[in-house]
Image (spheres, grey):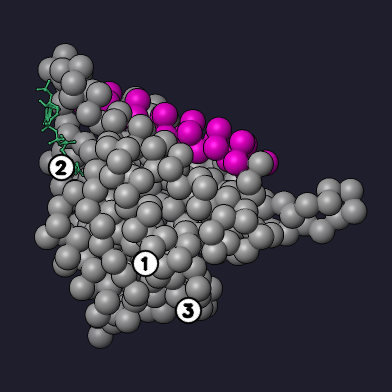
Amino acid sequence: KLDSKREREGESGVSMESPFKADILKGKVALLTGGGSGIGYEISTQLGKHGASIAIMGRRKNVLDSAVSGLRSLGIQAIGLEGDVRNRDDAVRVLESTIKHFGKLDILVNAAAGNFLVPAEDLSPNGFRTVIDIDSVGTFTMCHEALKYLKRGGPGQDSSRGGIIINISATLHYTATWYQIHVSAAKAAVDSITRSLALEWGTDYDIRVNGIAPGPIEDTAGVSKLAPDDMLKEMEHVPLYKMGEKWDIAMAALYLVSDAGSYEISSELLMFEGKYINGTTLVVDGGLWLSRPRH
Ligand code: HXC
């Protein structure tokens, strides 16, 4: 079996350099919901290490505090803002605080999510609604309230470019996943939100909206809460034959928010700048959702 982490870190245990230049996000400001732990924290770290100032939003003060000190210890400008994406007032307040502190917003990453394993027959409608509220409505609320800051010409924005939104999704709903009816429905809605906003806000405001659909990522709540005991056996079907790392998702995010994810078309016919990666959800799962048992 490949152990990519050890290979990447080498004997010293020191992470190899990112393939991206260290200053690609210099001067950018990013707000990440759920940015204080798990995949969200790794994205916060990598965006910060590549020059962005970071605001993280979360419900738990202790998680935010330790995430902010972790980021600051890496020399990253970071603040933590308490709030629940289910609460519109929290969304408004957190966005206002981000603007007050950093002067603008370039990147919104919606990584807050809720989950638990439960058979559909044992899930109450309120349990279903709770996950829809966090994942789908929360994502829409954050996007909706962030629009005025992200749009081309918004506060502190370059008048020629809009901001960027990344919605963290999943692959559960591409087929059907046992005991995940609520999250599958919620993430299907997230993907649909990504496409609709990419269409409307890409056209009207030059905002690119994309998603990332992680597969099983080691050392995350997603895997520890959801992975059945036979997860490793299941991994035999992953073409790359290993679980993903948070770093894999952060590199995908970095690609999507960088200029590599946008391409300026200068054409007399088009008369505007086209940002070419827009409305897609990038699957980062080693090919798992495509695979079937060997026998
Ligand atoms: C059945 C459950 C349940 C469980 C909660 N409920 N947990 N039902 N089985 N294990 C029901 C409750 O009974 C209640 O319905 C409703 O859900 C709300 O529960 P609360 O506990 O009041 O909700 P709340 O305190 O707001 O907590 C939200 C949460 C919680 C989603 C339930 O787990 C949470 O805060 N999670 C955040 C962190 C997290 O889950 N991270 C993992 C994300 S991983 P009733 O009817 O009784 O009122 C991820 C990966 C996806 O998203 C992709 C993986 C590949």
Is residue 265 depicted above or below 21 in this figure?
A: above
| Residue 108 x %, y % | 43, 53
Disc on res. 225: 2
Binning the other alpha carbons within 10 Å of mark 1 as few (below 14), some (14 to 19) or many (20 upward) gives few
State which mark lies toward you, 2 or 3.
3
Helix, strand or loop status at disc 2: helix
Distance of mark 3 from mark 1, alpha carbons? 23 Å
Q: Earlier in the sequence, mark 2 or mark 3?
A: 3
Disc 3 target residue? 22
Amino acid at dot 2: Lys
State which mark lies toward you, 1 or 2.
1
Q: Is mark 1 within 8 Å of ligand 1?
A: no
Figure quadrant of residue 78: bottom left
Amino acid at dot 3: Ala
Which part of the image, by quadrant, shows the C terminus? Answer: top left
- Left or right: 121, with 203 as reference point: left
| Residue 18 x %, y % | 44, 74
Q: Earlier in the sequence, mark 3 or mark 1?
A: 3
Residue 186 colored magenta? yes
Distance of mark 1 from mark 2, alpha carbons? 35 Å
- Tell me which segment is drawn in magenta: 179-203
Binning the other alpha carbons within 10 Å of mark 3 as few (below 14), some (14 to 19) or many (20 upward) gives some
Disc 1 target residue? 101
Q: Residue at x 63, y 46 (%)?
A: 205
Q: Do we see residue 16 in this rendering?
A: yes
Q: Does the residue labelled 2 lie within 8 Å of ligand 1?
A: yes
Ligand 1 positioned in quadrant = top left
| Residue 121 x %, y % | 16, 14
Q: Do the residues labelled 3 and 1 touch (CB within 8 Å)?
A: no
Helix, strand or loop status at disc 3: loop
Q: Do we see residue 242 in this rendering?
A: no
